[in-house]
Amino acid sequence: MKPSYFGTLATYAPRTGRPGRPSKRLPQVVVLFLKQLSAGESRRRAAQFVRVSPKTIQRWLRQDAKFRKSVQKAEREGQDKARYFRWLNHPFRGLRPPLPKGKRHLPRPRPHFSR
């Protein structure tokens, strides 16, 4: 999704009679945030997309178990896409082969002597 779609959303929730600034936690914001996560974006990038601080997202995750479960589900859905994006944007992509698990370097090929 392009960031221009965000302009149609209300910026703050309606006043609740409680003191302080109104919350940015609107259903539309939460849905857009979860869509970004399921598309493979990180929490930080998804929070920037919906114009909410990553610390605010962390606070929401701490306070609401239902929101936390939906975020974990969206991250599982976008896990393969996120892995592909990390591979695609890796600075060493194409320059060296991936290392086997638990190895610090590639094994040296054995010399082939003719008999």
Image: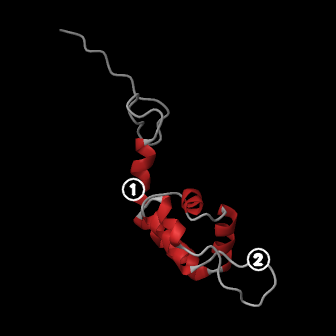
Asked if residue 49 can be seen in this view, the reply is yes
Asked if residue 72 can be seen in this view, the reply is no
Which label sits on residue 81? 1
Image quarter of the C terminus:
top left
The quarter holding residue 54 reads bottom right
Task: For label 1, count other residues whose C-alpha is less than 10 Å away and answer few (under 14), some (14-19) or many (20+).
Answer: some
Report the residue that reaches farthest toward the top. Answer: 115
Of 45 and 5, nearer the camera is: 5
* Residue 89 rendering spot, x and y as whole percentages: 45, 41
Residue type, numbered disc 1: Lys
What residue is drawn where x is 45% and y is 46%? 86
Tell whether 31 sits left or right of 12: left
Of 13 and 97, nearer the camera is: 13
Report the residue that reaches farthest toward the front. Answer: 8
What residue is drawn where x is 38% and y is 57%? 80
* Residue 58 rendering spot, x and y as whole percentages: 66, 67
The quarter holding residue 78 reads bottom left
What residue is drawn where x is 69% and y is 71%? 59
* Residue 6 rendering spot, x and y as whole percentages: 52, 66
* Residue 105 rendering spot, x and y as whole percentages: 46, 30
Real-space Cα separation, disc 2 to disc 1, in angstroms: 36 Å
Of 1 and 101, nearer the camera is: 1
Which label sits on residue 21? 2
Above or below, 26 against 90 in this view is below
The secondary structure type at the circle numbered 1 is helix
Residue type, numbered disc 2: Arg
Which label sits on residue 65? none
Task: For label 2, count other residues whose C-alpha is less than 10 Å away and answer few (under 14), some (14-19) or many (20+).
Answer: few
